[in-house]
């Protein structure tokens, strides 16, 4: 049974800095607002250094931070912006799988 559903919304907040799990990560935090609700997405990696319990490599961490930076560049190019704050108010289509965020996209056809 297909449980995917789409909702229209907008980017209500965009930040580069501490965020993610318990605000212990560095990267891009996006919040989306829809009719009466909201959801968030994070792109980035840990700020802490590796230790003997760490399950990721320093190379993986740098790759994920690089991907987050490239996501910022991609989004800013798409909307014609120069700063993450320019993303606020951007119209989006958000796809949910049940109550879980599945994906989202900028509604470039209405920009």
Image (cartoon, rainbow, N blue to C red):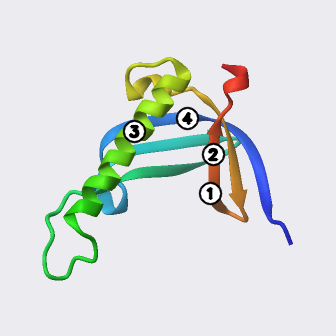
For the N terminus, give its image quadrant. Answer: bottom right
SS state under label 2 = strand
Number of residues whose C-alpha sits closer than 10 Å to that of mark 4, classed few (under 14), some (14–19) or many (20 or more): many
Report x, y in % for residue 20. Answer: 37, 56
Disc 4 target residue: 11
Whole-angstrom CA distance, mark 2 to mark 3, is 17 Å
Left or right for 26, reference 71: left
- On residue 101, the disc is 1
Q: Earlier in the sequence, mark 4 or mark 1?
A: 4
Whole-angstrom CA distance, mark 4 to mark 3, is 18 Å
Whole-angstrom CA distance, mark 2 to mark 4, is 10 Å
Q: Earlier in the sequence, mark 4 or mark 3?
A: 4
Q: Residue at coordinates 67% horizontally, 26% vertically from top-left?
A: 108
Disc 2 target residue: 104
SS state under label 1 = strand
SS state under label 3 = helix
Which mark's residue is nearer the viewer, 2 or 3?
3
Q: Is residue 19 at all visible to an observer of this figure?
A: no
Q: Residue furthest right?
A: 1
Which mark's residue is nearer the viewer, 2 or 1?
2
Q: Residue at coordinates 13% horizontally, 75% vertically from top-left?
A: 51
- On residue 9, the disc is none
Which mark's residue is nearer the viewer, 3 or 1?
3
């Amino acid at each position: 049974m297909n449980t995917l559903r789409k909702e229209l919304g907008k980017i209500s907040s965009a930040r580069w800095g501490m965020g993610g799990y318990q605000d212990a990560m560095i990267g891009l935090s996006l919040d989306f607002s829809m009719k009466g609700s909201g959801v968030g997405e994070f792109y980035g990696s840990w700020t802490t250094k590796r230790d003997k319990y760490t399950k990721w490599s320093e190379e993986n961490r740098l790759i994920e931070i690089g991907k987050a930076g490239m996501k910022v560049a991609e989004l800013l190019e798409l909307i014609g912006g120069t700063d993450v704050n320019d993303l606020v108010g951007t119209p989006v289509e958000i796809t949910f799988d049940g109550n879980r965020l599945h994906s989202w996209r900028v509604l470039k056809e209405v920009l």
